[in-house]
Image (cartoon, rainbow, N blue to C red):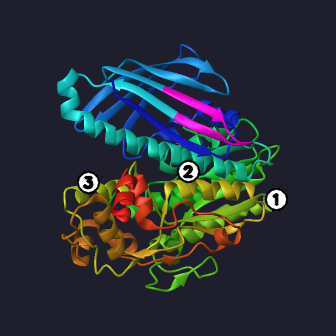
Amino acid sequence: MPIATFESSTHAAAEELYSWHARQGAFERLRPPWQQIEIQQPAPVEDGSRLRLRLKKGPFWFSWLAEHRDVVPGQGFTDEQISGPFARWTHRHDFEPTAEGRSLLRDRIDYALPGGALGRLAAGRSVARDLESTFAYRHATTTRDLARHAHFRDRQALRVAITGASGLVGRNLRAFLSTGGHTVVPLERDKSKTAAPGKPRWTPTEPFDAVVHLAGEGIASGRWSKERKARIRDSRVQGTRNLVRTLGELRRPPNTLVCASAIGYYGSRGDEVLDETSAAGDGFLAETCREWEAAALEAEELGIRVVLLRFGIILTPSGGALARMVPPFRFGGGGVLGNGRQYMSWITIDDVLGAIYQTLLDDNLSGPVNTVAPEPVTSREFTKTLGRVLGRPTVFPLPAPAARLLFGEMADEMLLSSSRVVPAELKKAGFVFDDPNLEPALARLLGKARLLEAREAA
């Protein structure tokens, strides 16, 4: 039977490594973003507990039921498939102390494909490659997350409230904070009959140290109409005012409010380099961001430290812009938008989580913080890089008139606008980007890191 073993040396102690894996959110952090996996029934790491998943391979969905066994706190545990796509699957997680304060992370998978020799012939190499990509990603994510948390090891664990906790950033942040030993409290909108329509009010019932405000109508999820623009604006501006009002009514308000914003604040500025001191631009998004940030800053009157995260294009194949780009690129239908000279300020989802974590725990950060990678690229560079990572041509451009015909006003403000934004405040705070360069970042997110390494070595 095939046996695959993957090992990594970490700077964390074995007990810390085990604790990270045993906490709620670990599976979400370890799930590669290019894979479609749904957790139907989570399970604590204890003997006899069962984890139920649903995963997609090609056009087919499979159910997978696994049981934890041989759990030794601080040392390791085993997952064994009870039912699922493999004829056999036993996965042993081991955490072994090495030098002082360090440990070895080892995953050992003993598996068999259905169909015997025919199954091995048909899918053996493909499964082996998938396992290699999956565990390369898992080990890198584990090491990175532990390093992020270790940076603030001397700080007490936080109780963090999150609005928009089920959104793309919110659900990833929830898993990241939970595995780091922090407590996450999702804040839900008041859906009672007495709630004013279009004016959500959050109703926290317990104290917390900080709130991360991510809720809001999706900006790029549909063509902009007059009504849709009003919903986008009100969900952010009025929603933030209502949140601040609610915080002011608490007996003990939180110390910190981290509020999402966007680099749309700067408008379209060509190749001008923009940092946090740059003036606001023109247009619907710039106006919305100005009012949105002003609403959040009202919390300063309550003695709350306010951080305004101006997000760039957040990259992950599990949602957002990259998820919409990848399918046409995979089929060779990708191409340059407009003239290709407009700048795209991007950042990976994992560096977004790291930046939020930095702002939660670094009391010296306040006001606007550009949440972008240090090297913005032009649309043409981005297109060519994505095509190269996927091994596909990029010969089908989308000219500006066609983009405007398809997307209307949103095309000019989002697809064709140029924002060359740099993260001056994060750099000043000593923030270390795990994904500073586009090509290796895309390769890691799309499960192509091994191919990129092989190409560079050739």
Element type where label 1 sits in the image: loop
Task: Give residue 124's position: percent from left, percent from top.
Answer: 26, 34
Tell me the quadrant of the picture where the C terminus can be found: bottom left
Question: Quick check: 15 left or right of 141?
Answer: right
Q: Is residue 172 above or below residue 232?
A: above
Amino acid type, mark 1: Gly
At a point 69% along the width and 72% down the height, the residue shown is 428
The answer to whether marks 3 and 1 mark residues whose Cβ atoms lie closer than 8 Å is: no
The alpha-carbon separation of the residues under discs 2 and 3 comes to 36 Å
Report the magenta residues as a range: 92-106
Magenta stretch: residue 94 in it?
A: yes
Mark 3 or 1, nearer chain start = 1
Question: Disc 3 to disc 1, how far (Cα)?
Answer: 47 Å
Q: Residue 82 appears in which quarter of the rendering?
A: top left
Q: Residue at x 71, y 49 (%)?
A: 150
- Residue 199: which numbered mark, if any? 2
Q: Residues within 10 Å of mark 1 (few under 14, many from 20)?
A: few
Residue 201 in view here: no
- The label on residue 303 is 1
At a point 78% along the width and 53% down the height, the residue shown is 255
Which comes before the other along the chain, label 1 or label 2?
2
Q: Secondary structure at mark 2?
A: loop
Q: Residue at x 52, y 40 (%)?
A: 7
Q: Which residue is mark 3?
A: 327
Tell me if residue 202 comes above or below residue 342 in the rendering.
above
Mark 2 or 3 closer to N-term?
2
Q: Position of residue 168 (x, y in %)?
A: 47, 49
Q: Main secondary structure of the magenta part?
A: strand
Front position among marks 1 and 2: 1
Q: How far apart are the two marked residues, 1 and 2, measured between alpha carbons?
A: 24 Å
